[in-house]
């Protein structure tokens, strides 16, 4: 008979003192399910890159579980889509880092508050949401992104329109 485990986490932010999100998730769920739950309840945009990290005894990031499949390069690699929580989280793994802003190394801290045996959850259960969620993208990054978009628009404007192309080179042959 298979034993079920439910992981209970308290999620906090080093940036925003009053933010807290408590949730419970089945050990057979993937890290992607945990990622989606955090994204949904934080109101984050899902197209931004993110990763989970399991810290070593010194608190340094040692094992990465990535949103993107890192491929095979001789090192152990873990993708959120295919890695179950129970594969990597042992009872002595008291903390995870959820880096939601990889460019600025901004993370949420997931503190393991309990492991419950002989239970089963079909989907993650949020038991507490309080405080202000840290912003996903810093204002400086937004300004940089807007500047890059403006530069791209200027570059594309320099190429002219498609009618100019056909006047110079003629119609393209159908394939």
Image: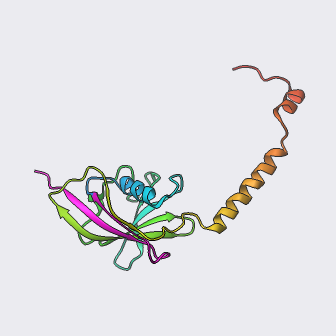
- Residue under the image location 65 percent in, 62 percent down: 142
| Magenta part of the chain | 1-25
* Quadrant of the image containing the C terminus: top right
Does residue 109 appear to the left or right of 116 in the view shown? Answer: right
Does residue 71 appear to the left or right of 89 in the view shown? Answer: right
- Residue under the image location 22 percent in, 66 percent down: 115
Quarter of the image for residue 135 reads bottom right
Does residue 15 appear to the left or right of 122 in the view shown? Answer: right
Q: Is residue 147 magenta?
A: no
Instruction: Return the x and y of residue 145 as percentages of the image width and height.
Output: 68, 59
Does residue 9 appear to the left or right of 153 in the view shown? Answer: left
Quarter of the image for residue 76 reads bottom left
Task: Count every numbered label the image shows and give the total.
Answer: 0
Residue nearest the viewer, comparing 120 with 158: 120
- Residue under the image location 41 percent in, 54 percent down: 36
Residue nearest the viewer, comparing 72 with 57: 57
Instruction: Return the x and y of residue 141 as percentages of the image width and height.
Output: 64, 65
In the picture as drawn, the residue positioned furthest to the bottom comes out as 58
In the picture as drawn, the residue positioned furthest to the top comes out as 174
Q: Is residue 40 above or below residue 156?
A: below
């Amino acid at each position: 008979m298979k034993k079920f485990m439910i992981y209970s986490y308290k999620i906090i932010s080093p940036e925003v003192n009053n933010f807290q999100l408590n949730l419970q998730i089945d050990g057979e769920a993937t890290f992607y399910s945990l990622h989606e739950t955090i994204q949904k309840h934080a109101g984050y945009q899902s197209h931004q890159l993110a990763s989970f990290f399991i810290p070593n005894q010194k608190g340094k990031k040692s094992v990465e579980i990535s949103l993107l499949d890192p491929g095979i390069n001789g090192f152990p690699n873990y993708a959120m889509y295919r890695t179950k929580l129970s594969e990597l989280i042992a009872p002595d793994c008291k903390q995870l880092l959820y880096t939601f802003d990889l460019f600025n190394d901004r993370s949420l801290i997931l503190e393991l508050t309990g492991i419950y045996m002989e239970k089963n959850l079909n989907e993650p259960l949020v038991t507490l949401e309080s405080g202000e969620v840290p912003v996903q993208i810093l204002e400086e990054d937004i300004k940089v992104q807007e500047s890059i978009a403006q530069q791209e628009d200027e570059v594309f404007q320099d190429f002219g329109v498609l009618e100019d192309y056909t006047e110079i080179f003629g119609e393209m042959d159908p394939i």
